[in-house]
Image (cartoon, grey):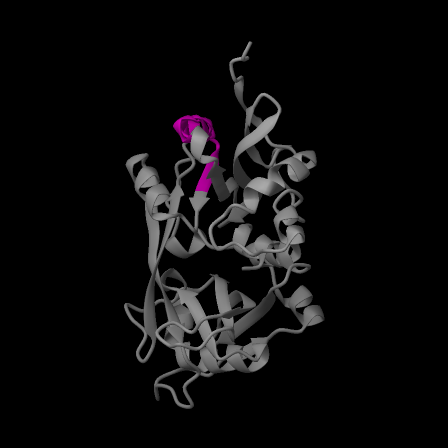
Amino acid sequence: MTLMPRITLRNAMQEDFDEVYPLLRCFTGSNLPRENWRAIFSPPFHSPVDHVGFLLRDNDKAVGFMGCIFSRRSIRGREFDFCNLSSWIVLPDYRKYSMLFMRRLAELDSCVLTSLTPSEKVYKLFMRSGYKQVDQHYYAIPPLPFGSLHEPSVRVTSEHNELAERLTGDALRNWNDHRNLDCRHFLLESEGESCHIVCAKRYKRAPGLRLKNIPVAVMHHASNPDLVGRAIHSITRKLCLRMRAALVLADSRFIGLPSVPLSLTKPAPRLYRPCKDQPFEFAPHEVDNLYSEYMLLHF
């Protein structure tokens, strides 16, 4: 006698990693080490919940997983729970159950949901479900040996001890939560203004070129995009020098300019769904790439 399959969807816990890992290896083009994937099951910052996503099972077999990176963040002095959707995979024979995950997400009324690397199908699905597009593309910016005559001078601080003393408020909290991850923090100061920037050094194909595995500085957070825009070429040179990178890759919402001269533009949709319990108008740069798969998976 053949038993009917028993499909269940439950919260995924940290101890489920070994069961879920074979699913994660199925991601197209994914060659991330096992320990990178483990990081989304045990993030180094505080989580407001006790689980790490949702696990679809057929009896005792894992057949689907949606990774959720939960965090509690302070935005302009207000506390919000964020949920970054890091990974979503369902085995082909079980795709008809995919909407079970969407129902669970719809129940997270108290969270700001973010999807920073959606596939084309997921992008269309989320947009139909009321998600908003917070960004559409990123820039690849070379360190030009010159800049605009109108660019202000910028002082850059990146030393650990000095950052601990000079960062305050939300910036200090973000630094504390990410200081042990594979990223660099910079404090920019110019004409009475400041900007906290978080970058990660990665090795990628140069956009528009055939070069592979070149070192790039990927910008994941900028607290003051207007300052970045006014001094973009000076800042790019300084970041590339300090990170030994050939380019800066920065989402457009981190740069207060309609375009960046002599840069390349590549599409990169970023989505979010506002918290239903706390209506709040986020500035685009406040829905950033911190507390996300970018920081934990190191890709």
* Magenta stretch contains residue 185: no
Vertical side of 96 occupied by 181: above or below: below
From the viewer's side, name the closer residue of 290 and 210: 210
Image-based side of 226 in relation to 87, left or right: left
From the viewer's side, name the closer residue of 67 and 227: 67
From the viewer's side, name the closer residue of 58 and 247: 58
- Please state, as top left, top right, bottom left or bottom right, where the C terminus lies in the image: bottom right
Give the quadrant of residue 251: bottom left
**Residue extending farthest top:** 1
Asked if residue 218 shows in the view, the reply is yes
* Magenta stretch contains residue 99: yes
Residue shown at the point (46%, 77%) measured from the top left:
247
Vertical side of 180 occupied by 34: above or below: above
Asked if residue 70 shows in the view, the reply is no
Vertical side of 191 occupied by 78: above or below: above
- Please state, as top left, top right, bottom left or bottom right, where the N terminus lies in the image: top right
Which residues are the magenta region? 95-113
Q: Residue 81 in the image: x percent, y percent?
A: 53, 39
Count of numbered circles on the image:
0
Image-based side of 126 in relation to 192, left or right: left
Residue shown at the point (61%, 49%) measured from the top left:
37
Q: Residue 16 in the image: x percent, y percent?
A: 66, 34
Residue shown at the point (39%, 36%) measured from the top left:
279
Residue shown at the point (56%, 44%) measured from the top left:
24
From the viewer's side, name the closer residue of 143 and 246: 246
Q: Residue 154 in the image: x percent, y percent?
A: 49, 80
